[in-house]
Amino acid sequence: MRIISFNANGVRSAANKGFFDWLRTHKADVVCLQETKAQEDQLTDPMFRPDGHHCFYRDATTKKGYSGVAIYSKREPDEVRTALGWAPFDDEGRYIEARYGNLSVVSFYIPSGSSGEDRQAFKFKVMDWLRPILDEWLASGRDYVLCGDWNIVRSKLDIRNWSSNQKNSGCLPPERDWLNGLCADGGWVDSYRALHPEGQDYTWWSNRGAARANNVGWRIDYQLVTPSLRERLKACSIHAEPRFSDHAPYLVEYRA
């Protein structure tokens, strides 16, 4: 099973840069998109319904062309969920889940706090609200793959400029403590870190300056899995080129 997670920073923009041609060559079973920045009625072109995939979108209802998540699936899910029960989060189009028997694949878009204090405060509220939900999922006995842009690095290995970003959203100590707490012993498994314990690869680069050319990046896109799936992790790859977005697609291959 091959699962791709990708923050498109506008699915129409990514499409114009060749994302769907690239996607076709990687034969993913499930694709989780974040930041689609579109309403579903704007995605009528057949390219937004890739051949052989069932396609599901959860758009933002608070503001058109904002946020948004999607799942493309070769196998038709038994069920698709698009709300977790808190309107301030749900209405921004930040969660969609496809269920296949005992397996759930989730596309998450955790808020960024980089635009100001109000959004950082909202991000912290989301983190506090989401923690018991994730704890419940972890204890449920279901297999989960949580894909998405979490907008948080975990450690010095996950960001080029560690020291200078300690006061910036995405690298704040409380954010890192929260995410690392999720991944503590017996908790969620960071697929990339499980496969590459000392890896220093990134999934996002600022559009400012020459950050991407100089690989001044952050690893903020993850596939977190339940411990039951740890032994099924086979390989993973971050596809920084070609460039479709300020993020790179992250692919994980799971053993059957």
Image: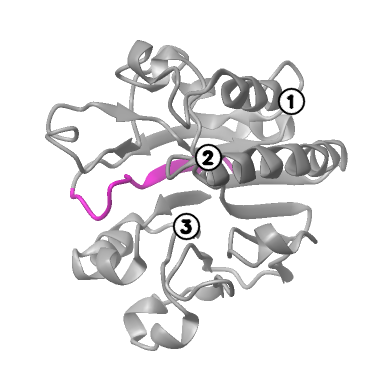
Q: Earlier in the sequence, mark 1 or mark 3?
A: 3
Q: Secondary structure at mark 3?
A: strand
Residue wearing tag 3: 34
Q: Please tell me whether mark 2 or mark 3 is closer to you in this view.
A: 2
Q: CA distance from mark 2 to mark 1?
A: 30 Å
Q: Secondary structure at mark 2?
A: helix
Quadrant of residue 81 within the rendered picture: bottom right
Q: Earlier in the sequence, mark 2 or mark 3?
A: 3
At x 48%, y 62%, the residue is 67
| Left or right for 107, reference 138 | left
Residues rendered magenta in the picture: 242-256
Position of the C terminus, as image quadrant, is: top right
At x 20%, y 65%, the residue is 18
Secondary structure, magenta segment, majority class: loop
Colour scheme of this structure image? one colour
Identify the residue at the far front of this view. Answer: 117
Residue wearing tag 2: 117
Q: Earlier in the sequence, mark 2 or mark 1?
A: 2
Q: Secondary structure at mark 1?
A: loop
Amino acid on which the number 2 mark rests in the picture = Glu
Where residue 104 sits: x, y (%)?
Answer: 70, 54
Quadrant of residue 82 within the rendered picture: bottom right
| Picture disc at residue 162 | none
Where residue 207 sits: x, y (%)?
Answer: 21, 43
Q: CA distance from mark 1 to mark 3?
A: 24 Å
| Picture disc at residue 187 | 1
Amino acid on which the number 1 mark rests in the picture = Gly
Magenta-drawn stretch contains 68:
no
